[in-house]
Amino acid sequence: MCGICGIFHLHAPATDFDPPQALKQMLARMHHRGPDGAGMVDGEWGALGANRLAIRGTGDPHPSLLGAAGGIWVACNGEIDNHRQLRERLRASGHDFSLQTDVEVIAPLYMEYGLDFAQHLSGAFAIALWDPHRARLILARDRAGERYIHFAIEQGRLMFATELAALRAGHSRVPQINVASVARYLSHGFYPAMSGPFAGCQKVAPGEMIIVDKAGVQRRDYHKPPPVRHASGRGDDSRFDRLFRASIWHQTDVDVDYGVLLSGGLDSSLITAVARTVRPDKYPTAYGLRFAERSFDEGDVAERVASGLGCRYVPVMVHAHELPGTLRDLVRTCGEPLADPAWVPMSLLAARAAREVRLVLAGEGADELFGGYPTYLGAQLARRYGALPAPLRCAFGKVVAQLPVSDKKMTISFLLKRFVQGQELAPYARHLLWTANISPLLMRQLGVEPMAVPPSPPQAHVLDMLQRQDQRHALAEALLAKADRGGMRHGLEVRAPFLDPRIIEFASSLSPAERVSGLTTKVFLKRYARRYLPRKVVHRRKRGLSVPLTAWLRGPLHEWARSGLASPLLAGVGIDTATASSLLADHVAGAADHARAIWTLLVLREWLEWLSEPLPAMAPESLTRIKHITPLQPESMHV
């Protein structure tokens, strides 16, 4: 894991712009991502840099920036899990290796397969590869989207970086806000890959490759999800067991201590249990969150799971007063607005874990792959509900609307109120409404016109359509970003065993009934989990990681929220601050639960404040010197 960045000239370089100096500033902004070394290489073509968090090949003196025979340079953020198998194959083709780092296989793989090289990689990665002979730059992101590359084209040059704060540091001018995309953020709580918060800024999409050469800038999907082909009957538990154990084995094949993020829920408990049997000599420490609010706290359950597996449990208590400062720190560190409230406790948990380990396993992806969200259950029930007589549905809706607002976590009243919304809509549009941070109705009241609902993706079964939507967007651009930004703020790598490519392919082959059946979610995964876990752990009601915002916004966070919602910075991007303040007033009065909408606006305000502040220069001395790297081209190596 590391941070990577680069500047590449699309035309003759400007004489008033110094790429090496700009790149030093970009690397300095990501020092938290790579405390184990940083380096950069430059030439007439531009500059490429990386800083490193050593996970594999810790004894190698190199950062995640490697030169290879033929003058190819590679910068990689992430892990190549199948590097041992690739080494054997590439050695048989005549390639030599002198290091232990997994990144070393990328350049030889490119030399063998050209632009198809990424298809052979398994892991979590974001790669920049410079081929001087073809004057070609390649940016590639892993299939699930676990790692990130932001890029922008400005004044005849392409710039890219792992984090937006680093990209901003390399700009010769203050980036312009993409006002047209604010509605997307307000709806989703994140910016999609194709439309970033800065004008002209985008992300490489999951499974995508950006190719920059004399022909211009091309976008190419090196991987697309295969057509859905459901297996008949029950999923093969034994086959999945082999795949899942292999995924955990590969992800823990590292040179550093590792732990687990354990909530006591199905996904994290299963990972912990399998990890213990895959490497029985290892007892990974389990790190978990705790809240004083009882309905949000799962610490007792997590501690019992850890104890039963012989693992030490480390609790991290989260308090309301920590949210404003931690949010401010996260936004200024990564430069991106992310409206998942769990981002803050994720960062606090990572800070504690990073004192002892450099890598943790987490359960991200299981819900999207195996059908774990209540919205999937709602989608299955919506057809039956829609068949009820209209007067009965109307009466039911009125009863639900009268249910009191609750401060507790994931209550039945909250789920029912979501369920009755948008019943007149098509399944895809209804799903987007159910998962929205701010509904179209509220957005219009705030003075922002919602984005049009895109056409429904072509899938034969509604469950396939909704799960693929969530995998491609909310998982890749929000939940995994929360883990990456929250973890790497403290130099902690978060890996997700459920997102191994073979696990993803297996899950997509399951029939809908093996994912959601009746009132049961994750049908297959729960059946499989009984191999490793007690039934009471497997069948606990899903809780999910969330924060008691509803209560905190009425109490200890009220004044902070009131001040933030009145900010003229929000008005500057078209948001009616009077309406925003009225949402808080209704929330405090108990007339409605607007916690998600309020938090989304507060995160945006925090980001706008960061953007309005001058970005102070960071001293190049903050970069670690690379003491040895073999130069393969006459381009200079800067340290």
Image: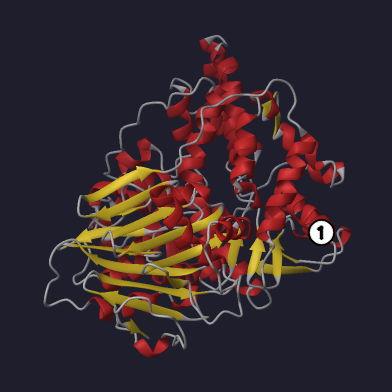
- The secondary structure type at the circle numbered 1 is helix
- Classify 10 Å Cα crowding around label 1: few (below 14), some (14-19), many (20 and above): some
Q: Is residue 542 above or below residue 349?
A: above
Amino acid found under the numbered disc labelled 1: Arg
In depth, the one of 572 and 250 nearer the eye is: 250
Q: Which residue is most to the top?
A: 389
Q: Mark 1 points at which residue?
A: 276
Where does the image place residue 8, in percent across and percent down from the top left? 25, 65
Where does the image place residue 50, in percent across and percent down from the top left? 42, 73
Kindly tell me whether residue 413 is visible in this rendering. Answer: no
Kindly tell me whether residue 394 is visible in this rendering. Answer: yes
Q: Is residue 514 left or right of residue 107?
A: right
In depth, the one of 637 and 558 nearer the eye is: 637
**What number of labels is visible?**
1
The residue at 56%/21% (across/down) is 382
Where does the image place residue 430, in percent across and percent down from the top left? 46, 28
Q: Which residue is most to the bottom?
A: 621
Q: Is residue 323 left or right of residue 536?
A: left
Coloring basis for residues = secondary structure
Q: Is residue 404 above or below residue 427?
A: below
Q: In this view, does 341 lie above or below 410?
A: below
Residue 40, by quadrant, is bottom left
Q: Quadrant of the C terminus?
A: bottom left
Where does the image place residue 588, in percent across and percent down from the top left? 49, 52
Q: In this view, does 50 lie to the left or right of 305?
A: left
Q: Is residue 250 above or below residue 366?
A: below
Residue 7, by quadrant, is bottom left
The residue at 69%/20% (across/down) is 232
